[in-house]
Image (spheres, helix red, strand yellow):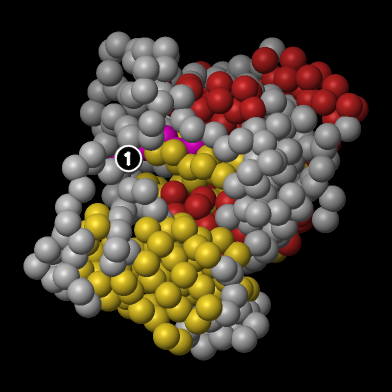
Amino acid sequence: MAKRTSLLSSIAAAAVLLAAAAGGALSADLGETAQASTNGTLAATAGCGKAPTLSSGTRTISSGGQNRSYILRIPDGYDRNRPYRLIFGFHWLNGSANNVASAGYYGLLPLSNNSTIFVAPQGIDNGWANTNGRDLTLFDDISRQVENDLCVDTSQRFALGWSYGGAMSYAVACARPTIVRAVTVISGANLSGCNGGTQPVAYFGIHGIYDSVLNISMGRSLRDTFVRNNGCTAQSPREPSRGSLTHITTTYSGCREGYPVQWAAFDGDHTPSPVDGSSSPNDSRTWTSGEIWRFFSQFASTTPPTTVPPTTVPPTTPPVTTAPPTTPPVTTPPPGEPGACTATYRTINTWPGGYQAEVTVANNGATTLNGWTVRLTLASGQAISSLWNGVNTGTSGSVSVRNADYNGTVGANGSTTFGFTATGNGATAPSGVSCTSP
């Protein structure tokens, strides 16, 4: 599947589309209609309890006087009385809704365990110029059609996309802050406009440090919009060095409760599928899908906080210290008791050719653990593709996972977890699962 858009013609096209988007603005009537039809304070939609008429596949819809389309994916075993998460996946420039759907909606479909309704809209001319707000109108119209027919939890609406799709997700966050709960922007820029852009939305930005199509400074600018809106403490997050073939994810501190901002910079170019330890992007091995899913799934199924945003804009000057806020305390506790560290494995989800798993690291002793290492042996044919909340050595066979910088200290009778996605058959659990400390 061709995803690269690094040609000069693509850059020029994006600049033209940006100019078109900047000239358009949503009308007051459109904004009011969106608020009335998909108000984020509702618990569930009109489609709850109804026998659905929509089915998975390509759907057509009249929007803004034009015939538009989108691909809908309804969970297997859909329960009309259960409110589901709703995720919009926007394609890239010269990509398509079919590209997004066939790639599992940026890899989130296999992680969702039938908990989510997915939508992949189709852009005009395979892009998201959003001229006169037409693509936001499409977002509203699709939301209305889906929610009038299917059971959606209105506190669990999300959007994501890469490149031009990331720009459209940013536009949704700016213009529909009470509708969408969180967005993820992968290698994006302000190409689809930002109507509004003053209210908080949970935000996750991902960008390559040497992006040759949309410079990382563009992604930082989008991120900083929601650093301010969400009341986070301004900082300069650490970013990996060229040639390190890794990524660094930072969670901002000081953000309003329920409105986190997360930033992941990776050593790579313009791609939605970077792989740690490799210069070759790969949809099935990338770490992005696992981190995005974890970011989206952290939000409880409740109405987001409605407290008034701060009246003063947080400073944008980076603080003197640039260390991530999750650095462990300077004072370190003594090593834990021998044998106090235990590891428990469980499979979270499986799909053809892959699975997701979680390991709980528990301290069963009376003293604090100061660091931990879990060892396990994966079955033949299994290989870790992405891992979070830990640092792994090896991806197949005998694998060890040590704590990350922020979760190595585990108090007495406390626990922490790390998770991973892997290729292979998830029906066979790893053998020799053990934990040592330090």
Residue 27: x %, y % from top left? 56, 19
Q: Which residues are magenta?
A: 258-263
Viewer-side residue, 215 vs 177: 215
Spot occupied by residue 75 in the image (x, y as percentages of width and height): 54, 69
Residue that numbered label 1 is attached to = 327
Corner quadrant of residue 340 = bottom left
Q: Secondary structure at mark 1?
A: loop
Q: In which quadrant of the rendered view does residue 101 lie?
A: bottom right
Mark 1 surroundings: few (<14), some (14-19) or many (≥20) residues within 10 A: few
Vertical side of 324 occupied by 87: above or below: below
Is 328 colored magenta in this rendering? no
**Quick check: 72 left or right of 117?**
right
| Along the viewing direction, whichever of 157 and 346 lies nearer the viewer | 346
- Is residue 270 depicted above or below 394 in this figure? above
Q: Is residue 381 left or right of residue 325?
A: right
Q: Residue at x 43, y 58 (%)?
A: 390
